[in-house]
Structures are given as structure tokens and as C-alpha cells.
Image (tube, coloured by chain):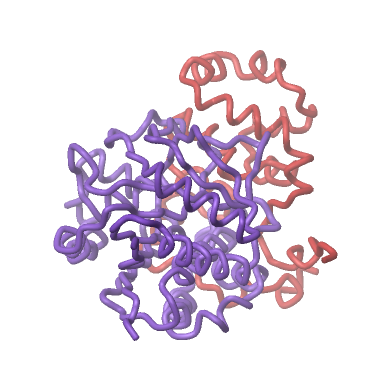
């Protein structure tokens, strides 16, 4: 069967992690995995750029990590479960980290969730939203 | 002969584990969700099983990007608890069921399911949070476990048809095991949630409820739902729900709905939970 990754690109505000992303983001995601080890977490938090220098990541990937720009990391092949090791190292919850990818602050995002979450109406298709 | 006696479906939100481990289950935010599992904890006490086959996904906890098995099976004597970046959850070690697991692994491979066999596996919240929800906080888990990790993280994930068929093959394999065991099958993950991108926080409760109805009443139709629809309607992480199809496939054609519970939100997620039993002919 012929793969069709293009079909995912019309979903607004969403980055689907594919086998192609896995290739592009391999070293970024492996760096994230290394943070499962408490000693590595300490070293990374003490001096991020020095720790990142040990990894065969692109400069763009390293900069996105330093900037804690999670959307950029996703765009460069990161997967959110791997990236979670970065914010876990800093003691942040998923809600705190995830909200940074939206146009809301953490309090507003948390309130949206308590109110039942983001309503899907208007969020099904970039074409519908005039974004594509 | 061994027999599949029940199917459990439940979400496996990491924050639920954190709430349990830090004594927050009675907080105003969490209480309504945990109250929804009180029935299930009593039901689990009243209906003890020997082994639970727990279908779940690893969240970059044990599996890195070196190896990404589509379907895997843990056949070890025991499974340690993974450090997911916050330290391991303070829950008991998970005891395996190697005799049934080796039989199951062999049977599935001979049935054309190319399982990756795991002699070492550390389990994460995907497996331990459902156990905590069903069993509370015991010193020792009441059931032995066969972990069945599925890749739902990297697209392409296995198709819905393949998941339902795997469940059917699990049922056949269990019934061919010589040994009088009561076996449960658990499908975990979901329901609607998206934890990345500008669309993060998506919840689609009407879709979730329809999914539950279809899972119970017409899995043969539900199996053809394309992954794209899960991703659009239930969020990028909602595709975890294909794991519920494996559970459903192992229960046979008709099921009894023993219990159903929905709650929004737990962290970023729509929580859904079912207890099903096979309907005897």
C-alpha cells in the first residue's frame, strides 16, 4: 500500500509524527530519551548548550531545545512523548508545557479543559479555516 | 482450558498516576473522576482474574527510537516500573505470566502476527495507571500481567482491521492453553485528546460516546475507521483507541456491557472506561 502522509497536513494546528519524522528527528528524540537518567537531567539543566553539544543534532534542533520552542521541535521531527522528557526534567506538567503551543496562557488553557476542552467545530480542516 | 472472562477499557493519563501517588484523589478536581472507578474496583474484587493481558503503548519510556515494534509481547517473570522523567511511580513490580505468555507469543506468530518478543521490559503509566484505577494501591498486584505494547505513536500505526484480528487470535490462543485460567484483556489509552500544536486540548465527547457504542455493538464496522478520522475527530493522540479494538476482538461476537464511565477532563484528556463480558451462546 502506498503511504499517504500528505493527508495529515490539512489538520489545523497538528503535527502528525510519521516514520519520516522519526528519521528526521532521531537524534533529537534520542537526546530526549537520555533525560530519563537523573544524572543526565542534572547536567542538561546545569548547562544546556554543553549537554546538547554531545548530540548529533542539527543547529536548528539544538536552538529549538534551548528556546523551549516545542512547536519548532515538533516541526523538526520531535515527538511529544520524547519532548516530554525536557519539560519533565524542569518539573512542568503536560498541561503547562502543552499550553505553550497554543495561543493561550496556562491558566486560560487549564480553564478551557475544565470547561470541556477545545470544541472541534472549526478545527477539522485548514481549508475550512482558510489556512490552506 | 483458559478462558477470556472480561474486557476492560480505560484511558491511561499520566497525571492520574501523579494524582494517585501524591494523595490528590479526593481533591475537587480529581474526585469526580476517581469516583467513577469505585464500581470497577469493587467489581475487580468480586471477579478476580488469574492473568490480565494489558494492551497499551509505551510513551518514550522504555522504547527509544532505536526500535519501534508494531506489536510486542512481554513474556518475562516480572516487569519493573520505568522512570519516565519524574522518577518511577511508587507502585508494586508487575508480575508476569510466562507460561501463558510464551504459549500466546508462539500461537500468535504461527497465526501470522509477527510479534516482537520481550524478555526484558519496563512498563510505564500506559500499563500501571489502568492497574491503579482497577486495583487501587495494594502492596502487591492481585493479577499477573502479560504486557502487549502497540505502536500508536509513530504513523503508520497498525490498521483497525489488524487490531481487531489480533484480538480474535488472542482469544483462540487463550482457549487452546491447557490450564484452568481466568484471563482478562484490557485495552487502554484514549479517548479524545491532543497534547501538541495549536489545536491542543481538543476533546470530542460525542465522538467518544459513539466510539464506545460502536465498539460494543458493531466492531466489524468500526475496524474500518481510518486513522485519519481518529486524528481529525479525536485528536492526534486519540488514535490510541485502536488498542481498544484488540480488547474487543478477544471477547467474541456479542458482549454484555457491565459498566461505562466518561469524564472530562483529566489533564488534557477525555477519560473513558468500559467493563465488558463475553455473551455466552
Residue at x-position 46% and y-position 19% = A38
Which chain's colour is red? A
Chain in purple (letter): B
Which quarter of the figure is the C terminus of chain A placed in?
bottom right
Q: Residue furthest right?
A: A2
- For the residue pair A90 and B253, the one nearer the viewer reads as B253
Residue A92 location, quadrant: top left
Rendered location of residue B244, percent (x, y):
47, 66
**Looking at the rendering, in which quadrant would you find the N terminus of chain A?**
bottom right
x, y (%) of residue B206?
45, 80
Vertical side of B103 occupied by B209: above or below: below
Residue at the location (57% across, 69% down)?
A: B165
Q: Is residue B194 visible?
A: yes
The picture places residue B143, in percent across and down from the top left corner, at: 27, 49
To which quarter of the image does residue B265 belong? Answer: bottom left
Q: Residue at x 47, y 50 (%)?
A: B103
Name the side, left or right, on which A45 lies relative to A116.
right
User: Can you say whether B197 is above or below B97 in the image?
Assistant: below
**Count of numbered badges drawn on the protein:** 0
User: In the picture provided, is B113 more to the left or to the right than B234?
Assistant: right
Residue A108 in view (yes/no) = no
Q: Kindly identify the residue that appears in the image at 22 percent across and 47 percent down.
A: B142
Answer with the quarter of the image where residue B166 lies: bottom right
Amino acid at each position: 500500500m502506498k503511504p499517504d502522509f500528505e493527508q495529515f497536513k490539512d489538520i489545523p494546528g497538528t503535527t502528525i509524527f510519521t516514520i519520516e519524522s522519526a528519521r528526521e528527528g532521531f537524534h533529537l528524540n534520542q537526546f530526549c530519551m537520555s533525560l530519563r537518567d537523573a544524572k543526565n537531567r542534572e547536567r542538561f539543566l546545569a548547562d544546556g548548550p554543553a549537554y546538547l553539544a554531545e548530540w548529533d543534532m542539527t543547529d536548528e534542533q539544538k536552538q529549538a531545545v534551548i528556546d523551549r520552542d516545542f512547536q519548532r521541535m515538533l516541526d523538526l521531527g520531535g515527538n511529544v512523548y520524547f519532548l516530554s522528557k525536557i519539560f519533565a526534567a524542569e518539573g512542568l506538567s503536560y498541561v503547562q508545557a502543552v499550553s505553550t503551543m497554543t495561543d493561550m496562557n496556562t491558566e486560560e488553557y487549564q480553564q478551557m479543559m475544565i470547561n470541556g476542552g477545545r470544541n472541534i467545530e472549526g478545527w477539522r480542516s485548514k481549508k475550512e479555516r482558510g489556512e490552506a | 482450558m483458559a478462558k477470556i472472562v472480561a474486557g476492560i477499557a480505560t484511558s491511561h493519563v499520566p497525571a492520574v498516576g501523579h494524582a494517585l501517588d501524591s494523595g490528590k484523589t479526593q481533591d475537587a478536581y480529581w474526585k469526580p473522576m476517581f469516583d467513577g472507578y469505585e464500581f470497577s474496583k469493587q467489581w475487580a474484587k468480586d471477579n478476580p482474574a488469574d492473568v490480565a493481558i494489558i494492551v497499551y503503548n509505551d510513551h518514550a519510556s522504555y522504547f527509544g527510537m532505536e526500535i519501534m515494534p508494531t506489536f510486542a509481547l512481554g513474556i518475562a517473570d516480572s516487569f519493573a516500573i520505568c522512570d519516565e522523567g519524574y522518577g518511577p511511580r511508587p507502585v508494586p513490580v508487575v508480575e508476569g505470566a510466562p507460561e501463558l505468555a510464551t504459549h500466546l507469543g508462539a500461537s500468535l506468530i504461527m497465526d501470522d502476527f509477527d510479534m516482537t518478543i520481550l524478555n526484558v521490559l519496563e512498563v510505564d503509566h500506559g500499563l500501571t495507571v489502568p492497574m491503579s484505577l482497577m486495583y487501587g494501591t495494594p502492596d502487591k498486584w492481585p493479577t499477573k500481567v502479560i504486557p502487549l505494547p502497540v505502536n500508536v505513536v509513530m504513523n503508520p500505526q497498525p490498521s483497525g482491521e489488524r487490531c481487531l484480528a489480533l484480538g480474535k487470535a488472542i482469544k483462540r490462543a487463550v482457549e487452546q492453553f491447557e490450564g484452568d485460567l481466568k484471563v482478562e484483556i484490557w485495552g487502554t489509552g484514549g479517548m479524545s485528546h491532543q497534547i501538541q500544536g495549536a489545536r491542543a486540548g481538543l476533546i470530542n465527547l460525542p465522538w467518544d460516546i459513539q466510539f464506545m457504542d460502536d465498539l460494543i455493538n458493531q466492531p466489524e464496522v468500526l475496524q474500518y475507521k481510518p486513522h485519519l478520522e481518529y486524528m481529525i475527530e479525536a485528536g492526534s493522540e486519540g488514535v490510541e483507541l485502536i488498542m481498544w479494538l484488540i480488547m474487543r476482538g478477544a471477547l467474541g461476537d456479542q458482549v454484555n456491557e457491565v459498566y461505562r464511565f466518561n469524564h472530562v477532563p483529566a489533564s488534557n484528556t477525555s477519560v473513558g472506561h468500559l467493563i465488558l463480558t463475553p455473551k455466552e451462546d
